Image: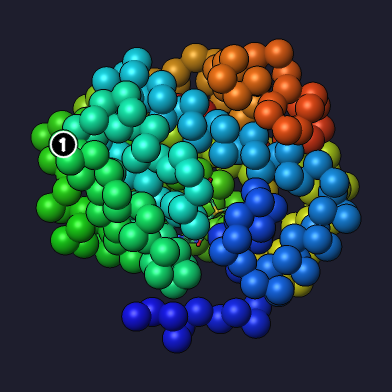
Amino acid sequence: MPEHRIDTESAHSARIYDYILGGDDNYPADREAGDAMCREWPALPVHMRANRDFMHRAVRYLAEEAGIRQFLDIGTGIPTSPNLHEIAQAAAPAARVVYVDNDPLVLSLSQGLLSGTPEGRTAYVEADMRDPAAVLDAPGFRETLDLSEPVALTVIAIVHFMLDEHDAVGIVRRLLDPLPSGSCLAMSVGTADFAPDEVGRVAREYAARGMPMRLRTLDEAAEFFAGLDLVEPGVVQVHKWRPNRTDGTENGTGPGYGVIRDEDIAMYGAVGRKP
Ligand SMILES: C[S@@+](CC[C@H](N)C(=O)[O-])C[C@H]1O[C@@H](n2cnc3c(N)ncnc32)[C@H](O)[C@@H]1O
C-alpha cells in the first residue's frame, strides 16, 4: 500500500482543496494551510466550489451535447461525489474514464473512483503530468481508451501549479496530440486578474508551503486552446461558463455560497474541440 509515502506533516494541494470543499481526507497541516488561506481571502471556498461546479457542467456538456464517451482526467484530486465518471456515466452509462494524479493519498483513495457502471470503465493511473509520456504509455490509459474515437482531456485546477519551466502549454499539447479529431479539451486555469491582492496573498501561502504558483492572464489561459475551436462562450471566469439552474450559477449564485461576485472567482474556464 502507498500509505507510507504520504507526507502528513506538510500541507498538500489536493488535501487543502478537499478540506475547503468540506471533505474528510486531510490532515492538521492541510487544515492549518486552508484556514490561513481563507483568512487572506475569505472568498476561497466560493472560488473552489465554483471550480468544481464548472467541472460538473463541462463534463455534462461533453457527454450530453458533444457526444463524448471517453475522458482523460489529469489532476483528479481526492474523490468527491459527484466524481467525473458519475457525471459522464449518468449521461452515457458506457462512458470510459481514466483518472491521473501524482499524489499518493489520491492513489490510496482511488478505489472510490473505480466504482463505475457495469457498461462503462474507469481506470486510475499514478503519473506526473509533467511527464506526458508516462501518462500516454501507462497500461491503464492504453487499455481503457480507444484512440480511434474522440476523447475529452480534462485538466481542471492544476496548471497553476506548473511553473514556466514546466511548459504547461506544451504538456497539454503533447497530451492532446494522439487524440483524434473531435476530441475536446476542458480546462480551468488560475488567474489573479479579478482580485490581485487577495489571490496574490493566497499564492504566497501556497508558495510558503512548497507549492509555488503560476497564475495566468486571459491571453495566457487562451494559449492552451490555440488551434482548437472554442465552444461558446469561450474563455471566461468559471462561473460564467454555461451557467445553469442545477448549481444556481444561472442567477449568479451557488448552493450554500450565496451570490457569486466576479472578484470571488480566480479561475478561467473553457472547452475547445480539436478540428
Ligand atoms: C486543486 S486539485 C484539483 C482536483 C480536481 N481536478 C478538481 O478541479 O476538482 C489539483 C490536483 O492536481 C494534482 N496534481 C498537482 N500536480 C500534479 C502533477 N504534476 N501531475 C499530476 N497531478 C498533479 C494534485 O495532486 C491535486 O489532486
Seen in the image, is 88 located left or right of residue 104?
A: left
Query: Which kind of residue does numbered mark 1 sit on?
Result: Glu
Q: Residue at x 57, y 39 (%)?
A: 52
Of the 4 image quadrants, the one containing the N terminus is: bottom left
Q: Residue at x 15, y 53 (%)?
A: 142
Q: Position of residue 224 (x, y in %)?
A: 47, 38
From what the image shows, is residue 83 above or below residue 104?
above
User: Between 40 and 31, which is closer to the camera in this rendering?
Assistant: 31
The quadrant in which residue 46 appears is top right
- State the SS at label 1: loop
Q: Is any atom of residue 132 visible in this view? A: no
The quadrant in which residue 51 appears is top right
Q: Is any atom of residue 58 visible in this view? A: yes
From what the image shows, is residue 70 above or below residue 112?
above
Looking at the image, the residue that sits furthest to the bottom is: 4
Q: Residue at x 65, y 39 (%)?
A: 49
The residue that disc 1 covers is 119
